[in-house]
Amino acid sequence: MATLTAPVAERGLLARPIEPTGVWSWLTTVDAKRIGILYGVTAFIFFLIGGTEALVMRTQLAVPDSRLVGPGIFNAMFTMHGTTMIFLVVMPLSVAFFNYIVPLQIGARDVAFPRLNAFSYWVFLSGAVLMHLSFVIGQVPDTGWFSYANLTERAYSPSAGVDFWVVGLQVLGIASLAGAFNFLVTIINLRAPGLSLMRMPLFTWTTFITSILMVLAFPVITVALVELMFDRLFGTNFFNTAQGADPILWQHLFWVFGHPEVYILILPAMGVVSDVLPVFSRKPLFGYPFMVYAVASIAFLSFTVWAHHMFTTGLGPIATSFFTASTMLIAVPTGIKVFNWISTVYGGSISLKTPALFALGFIAMFTIGGLSGVMHASPPVDTQHQDTYFVVAHFHYVLFGGSIFGLFSGIYFWFPKITGRMLDEKIGTLHFWLMLIGFNLTFGPMHFLGVDGMPRRIFTYPAEMGWGTWNLVATIGAYIIGLSILVFIVNVFKSLRSGDRAGADPWDGRTLEWTTSSPPPHYNFAEIPVVHARDDFWVQKYPDLAGGHGGEIIASAPVAVAAAVGHDEHVYVHLPDPSYWPLITASGIFVAGFGLLFFMLLLPVGLFVVLFGTVGWSTEPVNG
Amino acid sequence: MEHTAVLPAEAHETTTGLNHRKVLMWAFLGSDCMLFGSLIGTYLVYRGRYLAGPKPTDVFDIPYTSVSALALLMSSLAMVLALAAIQRGDIRRLKIWLLCVAGLGLVFIGGQVYEFTSFGEEGLNLAVSTFGTTFFVLTGFHGTHVTFGIVWLLMIWIMAKRGQMTQARSLDVEIAGLYWHFVDIVWIIIFTVVYLIPV
């Protein structure tokens, strides 16, 4: 009888793929957890590439009058190092956590748009590969990660390098937008019952705000890139000074995007640290509402400070005063966050596990970077420091000392959740100290070099300048950072082979991701959780101590929590099936980009594949 | 696959009660505001700084462009009526109004093609001046948006013809409508900034 009543499966243009394992299952997956792993592994590979580029630069600069690599290669190295670390490392590593952790933190089984999410990853990979094809033909982008006009015009940059940069970044922008739309809607619309906005974990909050920033900032860089691409490919005059164009327009468009982008890079790391510190201090986050409002005000103010990157262009006294004031203002919510993190740790029963070490390192390093940053709100100081190593020191303290330390804190914190195995604490501690020492040896001296007048983006310097000693120290530091990354890789492989089993809740966690097994089942939660409080899991475990402080909690034994953990084979949760369409549509974008760079006839072919993919996508039945 | 308790993703209740795709469309429109804002900003920065080629006053035919602008604005009315039709379950009128929207959109695009061609004959092109550059790229981006909207509406029309559009799927029309109205509003701004305000 069953055969008579079985629903006739609706068919789209292609049947849904069904393989549960193997290469095809990864190519067609729409599972946010798998996409998170893809994002994370890809970002780490690019971290190694970008790090190698940094080591080439540091080796070149180790001694004065060095001729190891020429100026051409050096220009390519700093351009690709910056572009890679920002767009191919810190952003995708954050997105990896958005994918894996946010659905767990909000008690959802999936994201709002699983296929759009998969599409985001494949487009990201396409953009990254397109940009790196420049190495294959030996015309690497060499105009800096901000590629100021009109140096980038065909007349002044005749090699194809800038084309690779322009096309690659546009494709990466599509990926970021697709991902941001998905997480915006997911957090608005897929929260578990009871999880009101002011109960959300801070990492979910920063994901939400970061998504808003991406949605509003990426169209601006897209327009700038389109304008530059039209100038180079179709002879338009957006930045052609001979026709009366103003190259400063590029700087405005770039930094209207570029400054929110800085917060796109740091906010997720701030979210990680805000979730890690309460767990390892066994105290609730200090001043939770202030933390939330601080994140929101930083995001709002980030659109009002862009011209502090442009003080030396001569904006006039009114604009300069405005951007000075707004830049000083944005330090206020940032300062609130720093004080709240310190107050969270204060009086807690602190356990210095590796995630906590990285989080504390984050606070210290980010504060140094923040202080040198607010110095540049002052136009006279900024004018002195513009294009010197002081600026290089500043933004590495916020982006490496901040973002990368914060993200490593997240890696050590959530690795057990993702793999089911603990990372080794001893090796992790070694990794932390090597990285902290190496980082400060590398970037600390750059403050001195900058104040002493050493310009950025020079491939060598004469011995008489007296910059040799600190440059050598910085290079040694850079190799220590490299060593620390090797230690981390050893830790990961050792853990995957023989790490301790993690269990569902290895850190005595506070939020929903620790209520499900490690790694979580495909459907995340057998039963959708109902949330009654902020730090709901903690409150369930220690009902009599909710909101209490460190010392008391140690005395309290956790009550048994009846969490539905494990792969219960009686649970049937139907999630969206895998799909070919995200991959097909993304490959169309790759072909179109490839066509723009190599063979114009492929452009319409690529666009046709995109159209075909979109039609197939939109007519695919939800459950095939 | 297990077929017990098959629930499409959309059948789950959402936190806000709003459909995912509708929230997505609003977010996309916010994003698109920044896109057109940047393009219009570029146009305004270069306004009047034209070193060569025809000036706006040499080429613009405001009565002509007003007619095609009117066609586009009227299409919004037809869009509202199309949505009202499917919400009452009147698929016949849905199809009529959808064709009407797409037709008025095509009138606008046809007008733009004619306008671009005649401007080209008068010596205005992408490369001749910053006016040519900013005018064609800004209005071209808008025209691409309209074209995309027309294709989208015609796809809905085809589905309606095949009997796949029912009252229950009125949201599909509503979301396409949001996009269409947005593109119309953008044209009001572009038409004012580019054509009506004298340099």
Image (tube, rainbow, N blue to C red):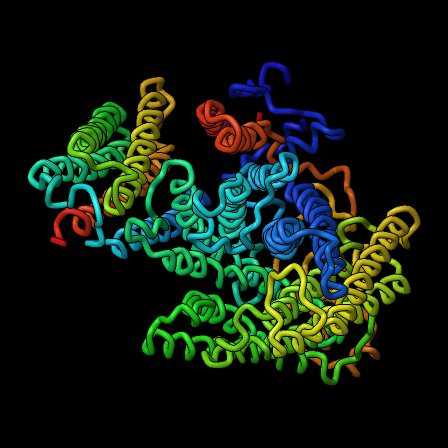
Please report the residue visible at 67 percent of the width from the left and 51 percent of the height from the top.
Answer: A70
> Looking at the picture, how far across and down is residue B21, in whole percent?
44, 42
Q: Which residue sits furthest bottom? A: A347
Please report the residue visible at 62 percent of the width from the left and 49 percent of the height from the top.
Answer: A72
Tell me the quarter of the image containing the N terminus of chain A: top right
| Residue A19: quadrant of the picture | top right
Q: Nearer the viewer, residue A153 or A296?
A: A153
Q: Which residue sits furthest left? A: B63
Residue B121 visible in the shown view: yes
Q: Nearer the viewer, residue A429 or A571?
A: A429
Tell me the quarter of the image containing the C terminus of chain A: top right
> Looking at the picture, how far across and down is residue A4, in whole percent?
59, 14
> Looking at the picture, how far across and down is residue A295, in whole percent?
53, 69
| Residue A266: quadrant of the picture | bottom right
Q: Nearer the viewer, residue B89 or B70?
A: B70
Please report the residue visible at 73 percent of the width from the left and 46 percent of the height from the top.
Answer: A45
Residue A278 visible in the shown view: no
In the image, taking residue B117 as reference, residue A348 lies left or right, namely right
